[in-house]
Image (spheres, grey):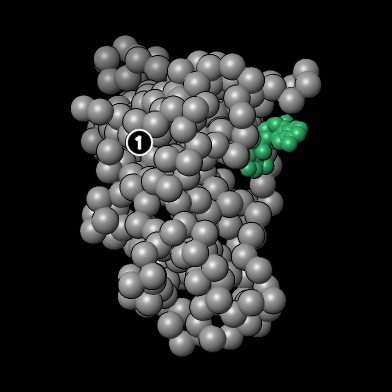
Amino acid sequence: MNPVIETFSLTKRFGSNTAVNALSLRIEKGEVFGILGPNGAGKSTLLSMLCTILKPTSGTATVNGFDILRQHHEIRQSIGIVFQDPSVDADMTGLENLQMHADLYDVPVSEVGERITSVLRLVQLEDRASDYLSTYSGGMRRRLEIARGLLHYPKVLFLDEPTIGLDPQSREHMWDHIRMLRKREDMTIILTTHYMEEADRLCDRVAIIDHGRIVALDKPSVLKKSLGGDTIILGIKDGESLRALLVGNGMAEKVEVHNGEVRVTVANANILLPRIMEAAATAGIYIDYVYLNHPDMNDVFIHYTGRDLRHEEAKAPMGKMAMMRRRRVR
Ligand SMILES: Nc1ncnc2c1ncn2[C@@H]1O[C@H](COP(=O)(O)OP(=O)(O)OP(=O)(O)O)[C@@H](O)[C@H]1O
Ligand SMILES: [Mg+2]
Protein backbone atom coordinates (compact mmCIF):
# COMPACT_ATOMS: atom_id res chain seq x y z
CA MET A 1 0.00 0.00 0.00
CA ASN A 2 1.13 3.56 -0.70
CA PRO A 3 1.40 5.59 2.45
CA VAL A 4 -0.36 8.96 2.49
CA ILE A 5 2.35 10.24 4.81
CA GLU A 6 5.86 8.98 5.19
CA THR A 7 8.56 10.67 7.25
CA PHE A 8 12.27 9.97 6.88
CA SER A 9 14.33 10.75 9.96
CA LEU A 10 12.41 14.00 10.29
CA THR A 11 14.10 16.34 12.76
CA LYS A 12 13.43 19.84 14.09
CA ARG A 13 15.73 21.67 16.47
CA PHE A 14 15.08 25.00 18.12
CA GLY A 15 18.61 26.01 19.20
CA SER A 16 19.80 23.21 21.46
CA ASN A 17 16.26 21.87 21.95
CA THR A 18 15.41 18.92 19.68
CA ALA A 19 11.63 19.09 19.37
CA VAL A 20 11.29 16.28 16.80
CA ASN A 21 14.09 13.74 16.79
CA ALA A 22 14.84 11.61 13.68
CA LEU A 23 11.24 10.51 13.43
CA SER A 24 10.25 7.91 10.81
CA LEU A 25 6.69 6.72 10.36
CA ARG A 26 4.13 5.73 7.72
CA ILE A 27 0.46 6.59 7.76
CA GLU A 28 -1.80 4.68 5.38
CA LYS A 29 -4.74 5.97 3.38
CA GLY A 30 -8.01 6.15 5.29
CA GLU A 31 -6.51 5.88 8.76
CA VAL A 32 -7.48 7.96 11.75
CA PHE A 33 -4.00 8.27 13.18
CA GLY A 34 -3.53 9.64 16.69
CA ILE A 35 -0.44 11.32 18.10
CA LEU A 36 -0.40 11.21 21.87
CA GLY A 37 2.22 12.81 24.04
CA PRO A 38 2.81 15.11 27.01
CA ASN A 39 3.16 18.89 26.72
CA GLY A 40 6.24 19.77 24.71
CA ALA A 41 6.61 16.26 23.23
CA GLY A 42 6.82 17.68 19.69
CA LYS A 43 3.30 16.94 18.40
CA SER A 44 2.49 20.41 17.02
CA THR A 45 6.02 20.78 15.64
CA LEU A 46 5.62 17.50 13.75
CA LEU A 47 2.27 18.59 12.32
CA SER A 48 3.64 22.01 11.36
CA MET A 49 6.45 20.39 9.37
CA LEU A 50 4.03 18.06 7.59
CA CYS A 51 1.83 21.04 6.73
CA THR A 52 4.92 22.93 5.41
CA ILE A 53 4.53 25.70 8.00
CA LEU A 54 7.89 24.84 9.61
CA LYS A 55 11.02 23.77 7.76
CA PRO A 56 12.75 20.66 9.14
CA THR A 57 16.32 20.94 10.39
CA SER A 58 17.07 17.63 8.67
CA GLY A 59 15.26 14.67 7.17
CA THR A 60 12.14 14.97 5.06
CA ALA A 61 8.62 13.64 4.53
CA THR A 62 6.06 13.11 1.82
CA VAL A 63 2.39 14.04 2.11
CA ASN A 64 0.04 12.79 -0.62
CA GLY A 65 3.19 11.90 -2.57
CA PHE A 66 4.55 15.49 -2.43
CA ASP A 67 7.84 16.39 -0.77
CA ILE A 68 7.55 18.80 2.18
CA LEU A 69 10.85 20.47 1.27
CA ARG A 70 10.05 21.24 -2.36
CA GLN A 71 6.29 21.09 -2.96
CA HIS A 72 4.69 23.46 -0.47
CA HIS A 73 1.95 24.61 -2.81
CA GLU A 74 0.84 21.11 -3.83
CA ILE A 75 0.80 19.96 -0.22
CA ARG A 76 -1.19 22.93 1.03
CA GLN A 77 -3.80 22.46 -1.69
CA SER A 78 -4.27 18.80 -0.72
CA ILE A 79 -4.53 19.12 3.06
CA GLY A 80 -6.80 20.72 5.62
CA ILE A 81 -5.42 22.07 8.89
CA VAL A 82 -7.06 22.88 12.18
CA PHE A 83 -4.52 24.49 14.48
CA GLN A 84 -4.18 24.03 18.22
CA ASP A 85 -4.62 27.76 18.81
CA PRO A 86 -7.79 29.44 17.54
CA SER A 87 -7.13 31.05 14.18
CA VAL A 88 -10.53 32.26 13.03
CA ASP A 89 -11.16 36.00 12.81
CA ALA A 90 -13.67 37.03 15.49
CA ASP A 91 -14.54 40.31 13.68
CA MET A 92 -16.14 38.40 10.83
CA THR A 93 -19.26 36.31 10.60
CA GLY A 94 -18.99 32.54 10.24
CA LEU A 95 -19.99 32.85 6.60
CA GLU A 96 -17.41 35.57 5.85
CA ASN A 97 -14.70 33.42 7.42
CA LEU A 98 -15.60 30.51 5.20
CA GLN A 99 -15.84 32.69 2.08
CA MET A 100 -12.40 34.15 2.73
CA HIS A 101 -10.95 30.68 3.16
CA ALA A 102 -12.59 29.47 -0.07
CA ASP A 103 -10.90 32.40 -1.91
CA LEU A 104 -7.57 31.56 -0.34
CA TYR A 105 -7.80 27.97 -1.51
CA ASP A 106 -9.13 28.76 -5.01
CA VAL A 107 -12.35 26.83 -4.53
CA PRO A 108 -14.19 27.23 -7.89
CA VAL A 109 -16.69 30.11 -7.59
CA SER A 110 -19.51 27.93 -8.93
CA GLU A 111 -19.01 25.47 -6.05
CA VAL A 112 -18.39 27.82 -3.11
CA GLY A 113 -22.04 28.22 -2.04
CA GLU A 114 -22.78 24.52 -2.06
CA ARG A 115 -19.60 23.59 -0.20
CA ILE A 116 -20.15 26.21 2.47
CA THR A 117 -23.69 24.95 3.04
CA SER A 118 -22.45 21.37 3.25
CA VAL A 119 -19.64 22.02 5.78
CA LEU A 120 -21.89 24.24 7.90
CA ARG A 121 -24.43 21.44 8.03
CA LEU A 122 -21.72 18.99 8.97
CA VAL A 123 -20.70 20.98 12.05
CA GLN A 124 -24.31 22.02 12.79
CA LEU A 125 -23.74 25.75 12.54
CA GLU A 126 -26.17 26.59 9.69
CA ASP A 127 -28.34 28.75 11.92
CA ARG A 128 -25.39 30.76 13.29
CA ALA A 129 -23.59 31.37 9.98
CA SER A 130 -24.55 35.07 9.79
CA ASP A 131 -23.49 35.85 13.36
CA TYR A 132 -20.15 37.39 14.27
CA LEU A 133 -17.63 34.91 15.66
CA SER A 134 -17.22 37.12 18.71
CA THR A 135 -20.69 35.90 19.72
CA TYR A 136 -19.84 32.17 19.32
CA SER A 137 -18.94 29.93 22.24
CA GLY A 138 -15.46 28.34 22.27
CA GLY A 139 -16.86 25.02 21.05
CA MET A 140 -18.73 26.71 18.18
CA ARG A 141 -15.53 28.43 17.06
CA ARG A 142 -13.76 25.10 17.14
CA ARG A 143 -16.49 23.61 14.96
CA LEU A 144 -16.24 26.52 12.52
CA GLU A 145 -12.49 25.97 12.27
CA ILE A 146 -13.11 22.35 11.39
CA ALA A 147 -15.68 23.39 8.77
CA ARG A 148 -13.07 25.74 7.33
CA GLY A 149 -10.44 22.99 7.20
CA LEU A 150 -12.84 20.84 5.17
CA LEU A 151 -13.97 23.46 2.66
CA HIS A 152 -11.59 22.53 -0.15
CA TYR A 153 -12.22 18.77 0.24
CA PRO A 154 -8.72 17.89 1.42
CA LYS A 155 -7.43 14.33 1.11
CA VAL A 156 -5.63 14.63 4.43
CA LEU A 157 -6.91 16.49 7.45
CA PHE A 158 -4.58 17.54 10.26
CA LEU A 159 -6.29 18.28 13.56
CA ASP A 160 -4.14 19.63 16.38
CA GLU A 161 -6.17 18.82 19.51
CA PRO A 162 -9.56 19.00 17.80
CA THR A 163 -11.69 18.58 20.89
CA ILE A 164 -9.81 20.71 23.38
CA GLY A 165 -12.24 22.80 25.39
CA LEU A 166 -15.32 20.97 24.10
CA ASP A 167 -17.94 19.62 26.46
CA PRO A 168 -18.42 15.81 26.51
CA GLN A 169 -21.44 15.92 24.19
CA SER A 170 -19.64 18.11 21.65
CA ARG A 171 -16.60 15.86 21.88
CA GLU A 172 -18.74 12.80 21.07
CA HIS A 173 -20.27 14.74 18.16
CA MET A 174 -16.84 15.63 16.89
CA TRP A 175 -15.78 11.98 17.01
CA ASP A 176 -18.86 11.08 14.98
CA HIS A 177 -17.99 13.80 12.43
CA ILE A 178 -14.43 12.55 12.15
CA ARG A 179 -15.53 8.92 11.68
CA MET A 180 -18.09 9.99 9.11
CA LEU A 181 -15.53 12.09 7.18
CA ARG A 182 -13.12 9.23 7.04
CA LYS A 183 -15.80 6.97 5.66
CA ARG A 184 -17.75 9.31 3.39
CA GLU A 185 -14.91 11.46 2.07
CA ASP A 186 -12.30 8.68 2.13
CA MET A 187 -10.07 11.02 4.06
CA THR A 188 -6.96 10.31 6.09
CA ILE A 189 -7.03 12.07 9.44
CA ILE A 190 -4.06 12.81 11.66
CA LEU A 191 -4.86 14.22 15.05
CA THR A 192 -3.01 15.06 18.21
CA THR A 193 -4.72 14.64 21.52
CA HIS A 194 -4.30 14.73 25.28
CA TYR A 195 -7.43 12.70 25.82
CA MET A 196 -6.81 9.01 26.40
CA GLU A 197 -10.38 8.10 25.59
CA GLU A 198 -10.12 9.93 22.28
CA ALA A 199 -6.99 8.01 21.34
CA ASP A 200 -8.60 4.74 22.38
CA ARG A 201 -12.03 5.07 20.83
CA LEU A 202 -11.39 7.19 17.76
CA CYS A 203 -7.97 6.28 16.42
CA ASP A 204 -7.12 3.22 14.32
CA ARG A 205 -3.48 3.54 15.37
CA VAL A 206 -1.76 5.68 17.95
CA ALA A 207 1.83 6.88 18.14
CA ILE A 208 2.95 7.87 21.62
CA ILE A 209 5.69 10.46 21.32
CA ASP A 210 7.94 11.81 24.01
CA HIS A 211 10.94 14.12 23.62
CA GLY A 212 10.38 14.12 19.86
CA ARG A 213 10.66 10.34 19.49
CA ILE A 214 8.09 7.60 18.96
CA VAL A 215 8.09 5.43 22.06
CA ALA A 216 5.20 3.18 20.99
CA LEU A 217 3.04 2.84 17.87
CA ASP A 218 0.18 0.44 17.28
CA LYS A 219 -3.55 -0.13 17.47
CA PRO A 220 -4.93 0.90 20.89
CA SER A 221 -5.95 -2.70 21.61
CA VAL A 222 -2.43 -3.98 20.89
CA LEU A 223 -0.85 -1.24 23.00
CA LYS A 224 -3.10 -2.19 25.92
CA LYS A 225 -2.26 -5.87 25.50
CA SER A 226 1.45 -5.04 25.40
CA LEU A 227 1.32 -4.22 29.10
CA GLY A 228 1.07 -7.93 29.89
CA GLY A 229 -2.59 -8.32 30.71
CA ASP A 230 -5.01 -7.66 33.55
CA THR A 231 -4.11 -7.23 37.19
CA ILE A 232 -6.02 -8.85 40.03
CA ILE A 233 -5.34 -7.25 43.39
CA LEU A 234 -6.32 -9.30 46.43
CA GLY A 235 -6.38 -7.82 49.90
CA ILE A 236 -5.17 -10.48 52.30
CA LYS A 237 -3.34 -10.72 55.65
CA ASP A 238 -1.12 -13.67 54.72
CA GLY A 239 -0.16 -12.86 51.15
CA GLU A 240 2.72 -15.31 51.04
CA SER A 241 0.50 -18.37 51.52
CA LEU A 242 -1.75 -17.29 48.64
CA ARG A 243 1.26 -16.58 46.46
CA ALA A 244 2.70 -20.04 47.20
CA LEU A 245 -0.69 -21.61 46.41
CA LEU A 246 -1.13 -19.81 43.06
CA VAL A 247 2.43 -20.39 41.89
CA GLY A 248 2.46 -23.95 43.28
CA ASN A 249 -0.62 -25.12 41.40
CA GLY A 250 0.47 -23.29 38.21
CA MET A 251 -2.50 -20.92 38.22
CA ALA A 252 -0.37 -17.79 37.77
CA GLU A 253 3.27 -17.00 37.19
CA LYS A 254 3.53 -13.33 37.98
CA VAL A 255 2.45 -12.91 41.60
CA GLU A 256 3.77 -10.10 43.82
CA VAL A 257 3.08 -9.56 47.51
CA HIS A 258 3.24 -5.99 48.73
CA ASN A 259 1.72 -4.09 51.66
CA GLY A 260 -1.00 -6.62 52.48
CA GLU A 261 -1.97 -7.01 48.82
CA VAL A 262 -1.27 -9.78 46.35
CA ARG A 263 -1.01 -8.57 42.72
CA VAL A 264 -1.53 -11.21 40.06
CA THR A 265 -0.89 -10.32 36.41
CA VAL A 266 -2.83 -12.53 34.01
CA ALA A 267 -3.98 -12.52 30.38
CA ASN A 268 -7.66 -12.58 31.30
CA ALA A 269 -8.71 -11.78 34.85
CA ASN A 270 -12.39 -12.57 34.26
CA ILE A 271 -11.57 -16.23 33.66
CA LEU A 272 -8.94 -16.66 36.37
CA LEU A 273 -10.58 -14.75 39.21
CA PRO A 274 -13.30 -17.31 40.08
CA ARG A 275 -10.68 -20.07 40.07
CA ILE A 276 -8.42 -18.10 42.42
CA MET A 277 -11.34 -17.47 44.79
CA GLU A 278 -12.27 -21.14 44.78
CA ALA A 279 -8.68 -22.30 45.36
CA ALA A 280 -8.29 -19.80 48.23
CA ALA A 281 -11.58 -20.91 49.85
CA THR A 282 -10.60 -24.59 49.59
CA ALA A 283 -7.24 -23.85 51.21
CA GLY A 284 -8.95 -21.85 53.99
CA ILE A 285 -7.35 -18.56 52.95
CA TYR A 286 -9.60 -15.58 53.70
CA ILE A 287 -9.60 -12.72 51.18
CA ASP A 288 -10.73 -9.27 52.39
CA TYR A 289 -11.32 -7.62 49.03
CA VAL A 290 -10.58 -7.92 45.31
CA TYR A 291 -9.91 -5.31 42.63
CA LEU A 292 -9.73 -5.93 38.91
CA ASN A 293 -7.68 -3.66 36.71
CA HIS A 294 -7.98 -3.90 32.91
CA PRO A 295 -5.21 -1.78 31.36
CA ASP A 296 -6.43 1.33 29.54
CA MET A 297 -4.68 3.96 27.44
CA ASN A 298 -3.73 5.89 30.55
CA ASP A 299 -1.79 2.85 31.82
CA VAL A 300 -0.20 2.55 28.36
CA PHE A 301 0.74 6.22 28.39
CA ILE A 302 2.30 6.06 31.83
CA HIS A 303 4.10 2.85 30.97
CA TYR A 304 5.76 4.36 27.89
CA THR A 305 6.35 7.93 29.03
CA GLY A 306 6.91 7.26 32.72
CA ARG A 307 4.55 9.98 33.91
CA ASP A 308 0.99 11.13 33.90
CA LEU A 309 -0.32 13.76 31.52
CA ARG A 310 0.40 17.26 32.67
CA HIS A 311 -2.54 18.74 30.90
CA GLU A 312 -5.13 20.07 33.32
CA GLU A 313 -8.15 19.45 31.13
CA ALA A 314 -7.28 15.81 30.57
CA LYS A 315 -7.44 15.08 34.28
CA ALA A 316 -11.18 15.02 34.88
CA PRO A 317 -12.19 12.33 32.38
CA MET A 318 -9.14 10.25 33.24
CA GLY A 319 -9.92 10.33 36.93
CA LYS A 320 -13.44 9.17 36.28
CA MET A 321 -12.26 6.36 34.01
CA ALA A 322 -9.74 5.19 36.55
CA MET A 323 -12.48 4.98 39.18
CA MET A 324 -14.77 3.07 36.87
CA ARG A 325 -12.24 0.45 35.93
CA ARG A 326 -10.98 -0.14 39.49
CA ARG A 327 -13.98 -2.16 40.47
CA ARG A 328 -14.44 -3.60 43.90
CA VAL A 329 -15.68 -7.14 43.48
CA ARG A 330 -16.05 -8.31 47.03
N1 LIG B 1 8.68 28.38 17.60
C1 LIG B 1 9.39 27.76 18.55
N2 LIG B 1 10.55 28.28 19.00
C2 LIG B 1 11.28 27.65 19.95
N3 LIG B 1 10.92 26.49 20.54
C3 LIG B 1 9.77 25.94 20.14
C4 LIG B 1 8.94 26.54 19.13
N4 LIG B 1 7.86 25.74 18.93
C5 LIG B 1 8.01 24.71 19.78
N5 LIG B 1 9.13 24.81 20.50
C6 LIG B 1 9.63 23.84 21.49
O1 LIG B 1 9.62 22.55 20.91
C7 LIG B 1 9.19 21.56 21.84
C8 LIG B 1 7.96 20.85 21.28
O2 LIG B 1 6.87 21.77 21.23
P1 LIG B 1 5.46 21.37 20.58
O3 LIG B 1 4.65 22.62 20.53
O4 LIG B 1 5.69 20.64 19.31
O5 LIG B 1 4.91 20.37 21.68
P2 LIG B 1 3.48 19.68 21.78
O6 LIG B 1 3.73 18.21 21.86
O7 LIG B 1 2.59 20.14 20.69
O8 LIG B 1 2.97 20.18 23.19
P3 LIG B 1 1.48 20.57 23.71
O9 LIG B 1 0.87 19.30 24.16
O10 LIG B 1 1.76 21.47 24.85
O11 LIG B 1 0.75 21.23 22.59
C9 LIG B 1 8.93 22.31 23.15
O12 LIG B 1 10.07 22.18 23.94
C10 LIG B 1 8.73 23.75 22.71
O13 LIG B 1 9.14 24.63 23.71
MG1 LIG C 1 0.82 21.19 20.62
Q: What residue is rendered at 29% in x and 60% in y?
A: 180
In the rendered image, the vertical position of residue 305 relative to residue 75, given as above or below:
above
Of 205 and 258, the residue lying toward us = 205
Q: How many marks?
A: 1
Q: Is residue 46 left or right of residue 39?
A: left
Q: Is residue 240 left or right of residue 245?
A: right
Secondary element at tag 1: loop
Q: What residue is rendered at 43% in x and 82% in y?
A: 126
**Is ligand 1 less than 8 Å from the beta carbon at label 1?**
no
The answer to whether one can see residue 195 in this image is no
In the rendered image, the vertical position of residue 131 relative to residue 86, given as above or below:
below
Q: Where residue 287 sits in the image (x, y, percent)?
A: 43, 37
Q: Of all residues shown, which one is farthest toward the right?
A: 15
Q: Is residue 252 left or right of residue 211?
A: left
Of 172 and 136, the residue lying toward us = 136
Q: Where residue 271 sits in the image (x, y, percent)?
A: 23, 36
Residue on which the image places disc 1: 64
Q: What residue is rendered at 46% in x and 18% in y?
A: 8
Q: Where residue 58 sits in the image (x, y, percent)?
A: 59, 16
Q: Where residue 277 sits in the image (x, y, percent)?
A: 32, 35
In the rendered image, the vertical position of residue 157 relative to residue 132, given as above or below:
above
Q: Quadrant of residue 63?
A: top left
Q: Which quarter shows the N terminus?
A: top left
The answer to whether one can see residue 187 in this image is yes
Q: Which quarter of the frame holds ligand 2?
A: top right
Amino acid type assigned to the residue bearing label 1 in the image: Asn
Q: What residue is rendered at 55% in x and 76% in y?
A: 96
